[in-house]
Amino acid sequence: MPPHWAHTGPEKNRGRTEIRTLCTAPISPEQACFPAAAQCAVILRQGLGNKPDLQYLLTSRKPERLNAAQWQAAQRAYWGIETGLHQRLDVSADEDRSRVRHRNAAWSLAMFRRLAVSLFIHWRAQDSKRAKTTLADFHEDMGLENQRRAFSLVNSHKSRALESS
């Protein structure tokens, strides 16, 4: 197959069988009417029993730095980010609806949200029964654990937490 073509045979994509073909071509910014454009591509997805789907792409990478096979692999890997961390932040942490506009506050909140997701992933890996749990389940469990600790602190005769070190 020529270097400006990439093809994958039948593969499973979200439970559907599909064939992907990518064709690239060098392009100038003037031709694309887009600054810094160096290469364009078209991806043809053909699902069994479905109409073909075309997707057009532009990149600033020259063909010698990004061949068709590399581009197709990068395009496939793109959704790993969307369905991993970004999906957790959107759905569980409701990050897209955040009204915080101050740069430092937004950065701080984003770091704490990512920390919470990292702790959740670690917590979930500790017990096989937690395989289907969500970030909301993690927040609830941590809240209950903190309530239990606070209750035992208030009701104990002599708390180790109140002792001086």
Image (cartoon, helix red, strand yellow):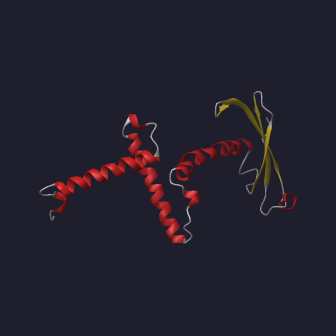
Residue 44 percent coordinates (x, y): 79, 38
- What residue lies at 42% left-to-right and 48% top-to-bottom? 120
Left or right: 32 in relation to 125: right
Q: Residue at x 60, y 48 (%)?
A: 82
Question: Residue 151 vs residue 85: left or right?
Answer: left
Left or right: residue 77 versus residue 162 is: right
Residue drawn at the location 43% of the way across and 54% of the way down? 116
Work out whether residue 124 can be spotted.
yes
Drawn side of residue 69 relative to residue 128, left or right: right
Residue at the right extreme, as displayed: 31
Total labels: the figure holds 0
Residue at 45 percent across and 60 percent down: it is 112
Residue 162: where, in percent of width, then height? 17, 62
Residue 51: quadrant of the picture: top right
Q: Relative to 120, say whether 30 is above or below.
A: below
Q: Is residue 85 above or below residue 97?
A: above
Q: Quadrant of the N terminus?
A: top right
Using the rendered image of the protein, determine whether residue 4 is visible from the camera's viewpoint: no
Residue 124 in the image: x percent, y percent?
A: 41, 42
x then y, percent, for residue 140: 39, 48
The answer to which quarter of the image holds residue 31 is bottom right
The quarter of the picture where the C terminus appears is bottom left
